[in-house]
Image (cartoon, helix red, strand yellow):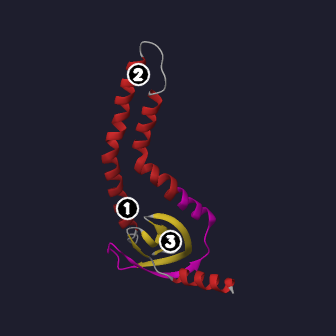
Amino acid sequence: MIGRIVEGLTRYLRSIRAFDVWGTGVRLIGIRPASQAGRSIATLWLTAFYLPVLPLARRVVQFVEPGVSEARWLTVEATPLRAREVARTYLHGWVLFPLLLVGPFVAGSLIFELTQLPHHGELAGLIRTVGTLVAIVPILLGVPWFAVAIYRLARWDQDRKRPPAT
């Protein structure tokens, strides 16, 4: 009984087309050219705020309506999921993407913490002061960095949905 429910739910989820609101829903991720001209390989993922949660299916797709920002696509063939692609998507989504966004904040915080360790002697106050000033630079640069990174990632997300130029 439970096996049939899981099988039916799996079949239903694999039949879903991509849809999302603010990166939450079902999205095509890992779009790359296939061996046949005009076709691409992509994986349908269940996502939460652009972070990959669960791979649903891997597809060979053909984009239609070239040049449209939200290009539509047709499934040409279903292919099995590949563990390496799934692992790479999890790595990019849960490790590299967050580090890209908050890297300067983390660097500034680490510099600040390291300079606040106990120092002895005449230079202790100077080390703390210089360390605090040095730590402020990446933290202050982190604000525009974060804004530019979000903008670039949004542009990349839109561009990758377009079919490859022929």
Q: Residues within 10 Å of mark 2 (few under 14, many from 20)?
A: some
Q: Which residue lies under the disc numbered 3? A: 46
Question: Are the residues at dot 2 and dot 3 in contact (C-beta closer than 8 Å)?
Answer: no
Q: Which residue lies under the disc numbered 1? A: 156
User: Disc 1 to disc 2, how far (Cα)?
Assistant: 42 Å
Q: Nearer the viewer, mark 2 or mark 3?
A: 2
Q: Which residue lies under the disc numbered 2? A: 127
| Label number found at residue 89 | none
The residue lying toward the viewer, choosing from 87 and 1, is: 1
Residue range highlighted in magenta: 64-91
Q: Residue at x 39, y 27 (%)?
A: 131
The residue lying toward the viewer, choosing from 81 and 12, is: 12
User: Disc 2 to disc 3, how far (Cα)?
Assistant: 48 Å
Q: Earlier in the sequence, mark 3 or mark 1?
A: 3
Magenta span includes 150: no
The residue lying toward the viewer, choosing from 75 and 137, is: 137
